[in-house]
Image: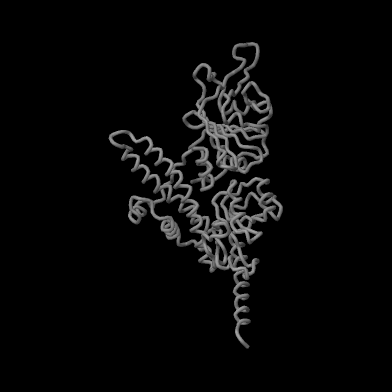
Amino acid sequence: MSRGALRRYFDGIAFKRLVAVDTVQGGSRQHEVGGRNSFNRLLGTGANRSRKDGNGIPVRYVYVTDDPEETLRVEGDVSWYDARHRDPKRGPEWRLYYPGNDVTRRMAEGDLFLVARKPDGSLLIVVAPAGSSVERQLQWLFGFDAQAAIGTLLGGEIGGADLDFQSRSLLEDLEIEVAPDATGFLEEMLRRFGPEFPPTAAFSAFAREILPEVDPVADPDGALLAWFEQEDLLFRELEEHIVARRIEAGFQLNGQTDVAGFVRYSLSVNNRRKSRAGYAFAHHVAEVFSRCGLRFEAEVVTEQKKRLDFMLPNGTAYHDPSFPRDLLTALGVKTTCKDRWRQVLSEAARLPHKHLLTLETRISAAQLDEMTAAQLRLVIPLARHWDFGAMPSAAQPMSVAAFVAEARARQVRAEGDQRRRSLGAVPT
């Protein structure tokens, strides 16, 4: 999708850093958020919209954190009204009134409070904790100044980011369904794979096949991004076609509408999308390693039946106590980090140092500090290093090319060590 595609989904946004008086936690009994000049631009200063009068503005409240399990969503409405409309002697004072709910009760001083107006006139209110990674992702997605305490973006001002996998995933976390772009390969996918979803490895191979110009040896960073992004676009187009056919067929059971069947299918669509993204990323990482001549093994079982995404050179070497520990490399692979990055720490107990290859960049300073303290080194494709320039060197991510070079150097040392062992074992 092209830059500015967010305007398909939002007419404008207003945001502010919450102060104590804006929040229930801060003691506010008013249930109102200040910053009226910013909201005036977004919501207008025409007619009052009052929940009490039954014409409040429909809204979806979302509270997002770095832990997906803590995301909260509430449907409701808000009031937008001139508190002085009955007093002709005083100028207007427009206020945004919110009811108490699971989201608004979590709001705290310093949190990011974002109001987005959708084309149908309804609102999306998003609250993100101060200093979180998701807060930085929202700033990046909508293109507003991270240092600003308050602001409004309307129309062409919206959208500082191209819509790629990361931004599409973030929008879907907010329950904004992103329409797939036409790739020109739908008929070929249906001819090759039929009307069902193909195996993940076969689909990843297809995505690479239609990008023959990509060279993972010359540019492993660019290749990994290109292959993964291409597969994500292909999958979304195929998914829309398959899901549409299923919905058209309807959900019936014994002559009755099968609500439970529909719910199960809806959940399966969402779960499939997330799991396939993870598998696709791992498939393309494996292809980069193979084409670059690295020895590796995927899905290696380690201590306590933990399963590591990639062990270099392999699991046999890891479980061999005589194999030098400094010639082993443990690599986790995750499209996004959030709180799941900690899983990698326990997946290869023999190694104090571990690596995590991810597409996520807007990682909070607190998480980067925690990763550094845990001796976890990030590996991120070079084109996504834009957000790490001010970070300490220990927190700077490696590029994929740098990781490949480091792994290759260890591999050469391991092969030399093996030859020396073999020579030493030969009777003189």
- Figure coloring: one colour
Q: Residue furthest bottom?
A: 428
Residue visible at 62% across and 62% down?
A: 402
Q: Position of residue 5 (x, y in %)?
A: 50, 41
Residue visible at 59% across and 51% down?
A: 343
Q: Is residue 161 above or below residue 17?
A: below
Residue visible at 63% across and 47% down?
A: 363
Q: Is residue 358 above or below residue 77?
A: below
Q: Position of residue 11 (x, y in %)?
A: 52, 33
> Which of 14/268 is in front?
268
Q: Residue furthest left?
A: 255
- Residue 85: name its quadrant: top right
Q: Residue furthest right?
A: 392
- Residue 394: name its quadrant: bottom right
> Which of 231/155 is in front?
231
Q: How many numbered dots are placed on residues in this image?
A: 0
Q: Is residue 280 left or right of residue 133?
A: left
> Which of 364/234 is in front?
364
Residue visible at 61% across and 54% down?
A: 346
Q: Is residue 155 above or below residue 82?
A: below
Q: Position of residue 295 (x, y in %)?
A: 54, 68
Point out the image quarter for the C terminus.
bottom right
Q: Position of residue 169 (x, y in %)?
A: 51, 44
